[in-house]
Image (tube, grey):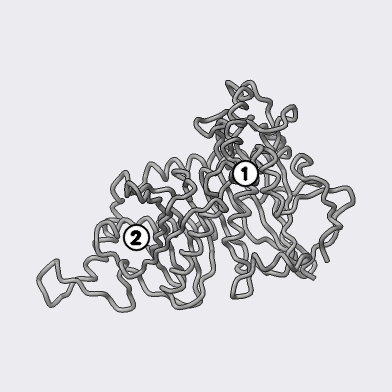
């Protein structure tokens, strides 16, 4: 996966007057060249509120919706009406000064003296949206008429196992591909250690643009790559899009497993038969194995206004954090040791989560191999009045453990499909890390 180029200065639109000399000192990054500007991660959400005119007061949300509806007149009727933008137009550099601002660490610190990865997911989601707004920004307007929301987390690949809680973090990113109404933002995170920045992770998010009332799709500025490097980046993003379509087409919710996968499932089934009985009903658990039914963990969240995004729905980063924390807890309970996240992939935001919803989270260990665990977290909202359930997200996490873990064994056909889906995600992650 491409790591975004770091330009000499971050986007002046999004970065307002923070001198790099204000932060930084062992785990504290050195000052950059005088005159450069950057954005503090803690200010990203405030900048997003400014761009769309969102209020920090929940009681004002109805009035804000009325005001934003009037911005529809500024929407383009076709993409041809919008000027093409360059990759560097959306380039943003954001800093998380954990080394230079000790008071900030409490929010990010976990019980193992490392950084809470769920908090990083929240920050990446906000930054990805801000990158897309920088690409679509019209300097003639005070507020953007677009509602840009996360549609998909394509991939987050970890480059180191530990994120230190006392070293400064730098995130850089920019737009790498644009469709008519969708935008791909790629981000790279690094951390300052022993006098230099080291890679932490690469992330690719896909955002969609909608009208001010978030009811229909809206056109975005086309992207004009400059030079061979940017052409290669854009082409790779086109390839990624094609792969996503192919994977969706081959989903086990749509088509039958391959011949190889059917053989695998049948062999798993045969390994669980009781050889003392001439019956398909007698099932026994093989040694060093766990039934999938016994590898679950569930949670419930009440969605309060505190966790809302700038469009008064529940913040996607909050959903990712809660899903990750449940998935990690499930992996830890399953393996009996501390897991380390390796990758996050294919998080599709199917439906927005409204404030006041009951969010049901269900985590399932669906595949294991050696010292690795693949966890799937399914989230749905429950309307307590109608008792209707609606799926909002499915999350996929790959964890590495400190020892070999038991095999997870499906019993039903549905569990077998979860097993195969988990194996597909795991195999894809391992290919990316080879």
- Left or right: residue 377 compared with residue 72: left
Between marks 1 and 2, how big is the CA–CA gap? 33 Å
Mark sitting earlier along the chain (1/2): 1
The image position of residue 157, as x and y in percent, is 57, 57
**Numbered disc 1: secondary structure:** helix
Q: Secondary structure at mark 2?
A: helix
Query: How busy is the neighbourhood of tag 2: few (under 14 within 10 Å), some, or many (20 plus)?
Result: many
Give the position of the C terminus as an image quadrant: bottom right
Tell which of 93 and 381 is nearer to you: 381
Q: Which residue is mark 1?
A: 129
| Farthest left residue in view | 278
Counting from the top left corner in percent of width and height, residue 34 is at: 90, 51
Residue at the image point whose x is 58% and y is 22% from the top:
78
In x, y percent, where is residue 264? Answer: 29, 61
Decide which of 422, 328 is in the foreground and name it: 328
Residue at x 72% of width, y 70% of height: 166
Q: Residue at x 60, y 35 (%)?
A: 63
Q: Which numbered circle lies on residue 419?
A: 2
Identify which residue, 260 or 191, lies in the foreground: 191
- Res. 192 mark: none
The residue lying furthest to the right in this view is: 34
């Amino acid at each position: 996966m491409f790591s975004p180029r770091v330009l000499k200065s971050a986007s002046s639109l999004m970065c307002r007057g923070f001198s790099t000399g204000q932060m930084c000192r062992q785990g504290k990054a050195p000052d950059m060249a005088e005159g450069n500007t950057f954005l503090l991660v803690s200010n990203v959400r405030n900048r997003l509120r400014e761009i769309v005119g969102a209020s920090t007061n929940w009681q004002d949300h109805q009035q804000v919706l009325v005001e934003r509806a009037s911005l529809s007149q500024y929407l383009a009727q076709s993409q041809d009406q919008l000027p093409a933008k360059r990759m560097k137009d959306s380039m943003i550099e954001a800093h998380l000064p954990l080394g230079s601002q000790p008071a900030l660490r409490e929010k990010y610190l976990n019980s193992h003296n490392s950084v809470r990865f769920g908090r990083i997911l929240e920050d990446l989601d906000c930054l990805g949206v801000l990158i897309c707004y920088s690409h679509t920004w019209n300097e003639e307007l005070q507020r953007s008429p677009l509602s840009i929301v996360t549609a998909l987390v394509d991939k987050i690949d970890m480059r180191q196992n530990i994120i230190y809680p006392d070293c400064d973090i730098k995130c850089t990113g920019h737009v790498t591909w644009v469709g008519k109404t969708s935008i791909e933002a790629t981000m790279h995170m690094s951390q300052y250690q022993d006098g230099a920045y080291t890679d932490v992770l690469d992330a690719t998010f896909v955002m969609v643009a909608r009208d001010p009332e978030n009811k229909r799709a809206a056109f975005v500025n086309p992207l004009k790559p400059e030079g061979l490097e940017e052409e290669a980046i854009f082409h790779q993003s086109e390839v990624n899009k094609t792969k996503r379509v192919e994977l969706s087409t081959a989903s086990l919710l749509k088509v039958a497993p391959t011949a190889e996968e059917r053989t695998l499932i049948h062999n798993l089934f045969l390994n669980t038969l009781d050889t003392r009985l001439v019956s398909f009903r007698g099932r026994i658990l093989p040694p060093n194995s766990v039934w999938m039914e016994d590898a679950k963990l569930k949670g419930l969240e009440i969605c309060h206004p505190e966790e809302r995004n700038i469009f008064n729905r529940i913040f996607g980063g909050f959903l990712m954090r809660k899903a990750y924390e449940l998935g990690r807890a499930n992996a830890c309970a399953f393996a009996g040791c501390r897991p380390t996240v390796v990758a996050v992939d294919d998080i599709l935001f199917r439906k927005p989560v409204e404030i006041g919803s009951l969010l049901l989270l269900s985590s399932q260990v669906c595949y294991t191999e050696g010292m690795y665990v693949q966890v799937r977290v399914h989230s749905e909202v429950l309307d307590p009045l109608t008792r209707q359930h609606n799926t909002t997200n499915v999350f996929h996490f790959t964890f590495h453990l400190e020892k070999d873990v038991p095999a997870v064994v499906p019993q039903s056909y549905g569990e077998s499909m979860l097993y195969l889906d988990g194996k597909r995600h795991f195999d894809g992650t391992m290919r990316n890390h080879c």
